[in-house]
Amino acid sequence: MHVVPTLLEKLARLKAQRNAVILAHNYQLPEVQDAADFTGDSLELSYAARDAAADVIVFCGVYFMAETAAILSPGKTVLLPDESAGCPMADMITAEDVAALRTEHPGASIVCYVNSTAAVKAACDVCCTSSNAVDVVSRLPLDREVVFVPDKYLGAHVQRKLGRELVLWPGYCPTHARLLTDHVAAARAAHPGAPVLVHPESRAEVCAAADEVMSTGGMVRFARETTAATVIVGTETGMLHRLRKENPRTRFVPLHEGAVCENMKKIDLAKVIMSLEEMAPRVEVPAGIAERARAAVTRMLAPKEGASR
């Protein structure tokens, strides 16, 4: 009798044929996270892309993440199983906007959140992620103005942590902007004593109402160490799958069920397999842009590398 191979069996065969590695963001569908070789936040995925020994990187995330992988691994083929998976925040600023900011703020250091296009990264001085934004800005000269793009909420978080005024671009993540203080109050009432974790892409008042403000990587570490029976998680709901899987004794509840990024849900296992079969869609960054963007991303990755990982 002919046995039809399962999707996971097909995926394993294709990975071996292509010498491929699958990277997935913490917000991806559960089936994609479970099939990935590495799941992490933006900083962790940046390292994984740079250090991957494979010839092919299948990036399960959104477009700017796959671009970053291509920037850091110019000799590898980078595939994004659904090239329509974009990021509204990344679309809120252009390289031309950055050029205008340089004119308005001569001599300023321009810090770029990785949730941005390759062209925007190439126009900036240094990149950061939500997990290392405070550290990156803290290393910049105090006598220079700092412009932070494109996320005004992450930038405001850095301001509060460092007590340093930044020039903030008015971009934001629509998914995290849905989180409100009313949600925090309701969650605390429903789960008394449970710690509330929120992502720094959240509104300032939501960050102030939470117990901890941290990246998804930080949430993974917190969940591993906490003794709390229940933890309230304020970020994109895809994060809950990993937290529950790795910490079965702890109950994780979403701060808001509506915190769903549709772009992060576009890739499924079938698309991953099709991508490896067809070796498409490929994400390629023009050489000139890639070289300048690589410099900005490398400045983010180089310092305190051991501690960051």
Image: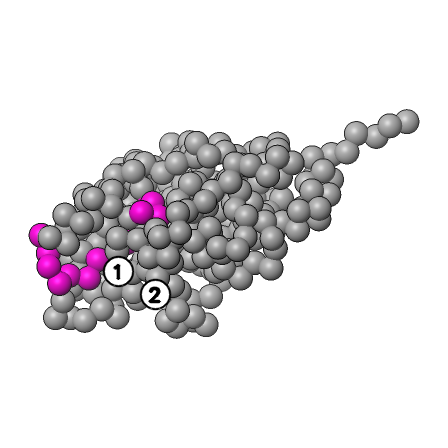
Residue type at mark 2: give it: Arg
Report whether 113 appears left or right of 169: right
Residue type at mark 1: give it: Asp
Which residue lies under the disc numbered 1? 125
Q: Quadrant of residue 297?
A: bottom left
- In terms of depth relative to the viewer, which is nearer, 126 or 40? 126
Q: Residue at x 90, y 27 (%)?
A: 1
Q: Are marks 2 and 1 in contact (CB under 8 Å)?
A: yes
Considering only vertical position in the picture, is 3 above or below 95? above
Q: Could you tell me if residue 165 is visible in this image?
A: no
Magenta residues span: 104-119
Q: Horizontal and vertical percent for residue 37?
A: 61, 51
Which residue lies under the disc numbered 2? 299
Q: Earlier in the sequence, mark 2 or mark 1?
A: 1
Q: Horizontal and vertical percent for residue 28?
A: 50, 40
Q: Could you tell me if residue 271 is visible in this image?
A: yes
